Amino acid sequence: MGNRFICMPKKDIRETGKNGIGSRSRRMERSKRRSLLEEELLHRQALSMAIQQHQLSQRFDGSMSRRIGSTSSRRRNDLSEQLPNSKQLPESLENIKTKKIVLIHGEGFGAWCWYKTIALLEETGLVPTALDLTGSGIDLTNTNDVTTLVDYSKPLIDYLENLPEDEKVILVGHSAGGACVSYALEHFPTKIAKAVFLCATMISDGQRPFDVFAEELGSAELFTQESKFLTYGNGKDKPATGIMFEKEQMQGLYFNQSPTKDVALAMVSMRPIPLGPMMEKLSLTPEKYGTSRRFYIQTLDDHALSPDVQEKLVRLNPPEGVFKIKGSDHSPFFSKPQSLHKILVEIAQIP
């Protein structure tokens, strides 16, 4: 995370012929080769960052899920340099009662995706922690073995169970990670001050996380029968165990507004999506989940979960507050990190 991307210097290459006029074909060929070299460099830099992320994670307590948070000042400074346009919010935030923010990634992602958000929240004085869900990020669990939402959510469950009785947290769930947040609201209502659903599966009682994406991907039954993106960890003669989109589909669905460097990082870091947790119905009660303080953040240039679907989720399961980020794709921590940061701070300040 402290690793900086160092761009290759570009030389002004000019070629002239007998009459001093550059050869167009040769210039185009050189430009093409240069673009390929730069693309390869971005992937190498992203891989370097992913490897360093893995090394950094070894420093955390192994008794819980490995997580990212409470970074050193050096890492904060390095990340601040990567975010030159970030605007500092007031340093004095004593009025915020709950400063611990737990970040839950969406399907295929890992704790690594929050690196910009963590840096910005820490600079504000909040205490962010990003968890790897089971079989995600650098968690070594085989994705094919993650068959239930309880299995998938175990790192979050462990975190909340080990939270001191007098402490509460703000949960932020991205995409399908919203189902893990809903599960936590139902089973640990006294430990969660607020829940934030970030272009997430804010489902109602009896719904499955997949149901939210059904309008985009088709019915669950049709998808499991015909999708070419399914993986079969137990053999083709057994039910599908996961989903893994190809690079082109992934870029179009998740990263249509994200910076190239972050897309490169995601391409070398994302893992298959466990199918079982996506197909499991949640039981949510009015007494627990129904009394929680929920907020929703809509992403208005989202191709994976369209603004219309997000609006429908809000209408059917009204939260306490709704925020919108213009120009954001399905990965607002990449495409609009400063906007996301400001909204999270604003939610944290709500009495």
Image: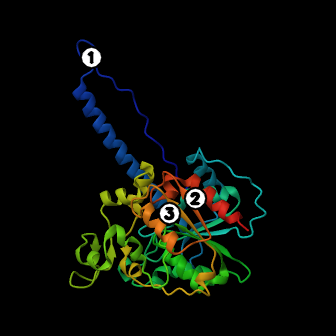
Task: Please give the name of the residue rendered at 43% of the width and 56% of the height, measured from the top-left corner.
Answer: 265
Q: Which mark is residue 313?
A: none
Q: Where does the C terminus fall, quadrant-wise? A: bottom right
Marks 1 and 3, how far apart at CA: 49 Å
Q: Position of residue 274 (x, y in %)?
A: 38, 77
Q: Which mark is residue 117?
A: 2
The mark nearer the N terminus, 3 or 2, is 3
Marks 3 and 2, how far apart at CA: 10 Å
Q: Position of residue 3 (x, y in %)?
A: 52, 52
Marks 2 and 1, how far apart at CA: 49 Å
Query: Mark 2 or mark 1: which is in front?
Result: 2
Instruction: Tell which of 150 and 307 is nearer to you.
Output: 307
Is 230 positioned to the left or the right of 96 in the image? left
Residue position for label 3? 112
Q: What residue type is disc 3 on?
A: Trp
Residue position for label 1? 21
Identify whether 336 is placed above or below 65.
above
The mark nearer the N terminus, 2 or 1, is 1
Residue 312 can be seen in this image: yes
Residue 59 can be seen in this image: no
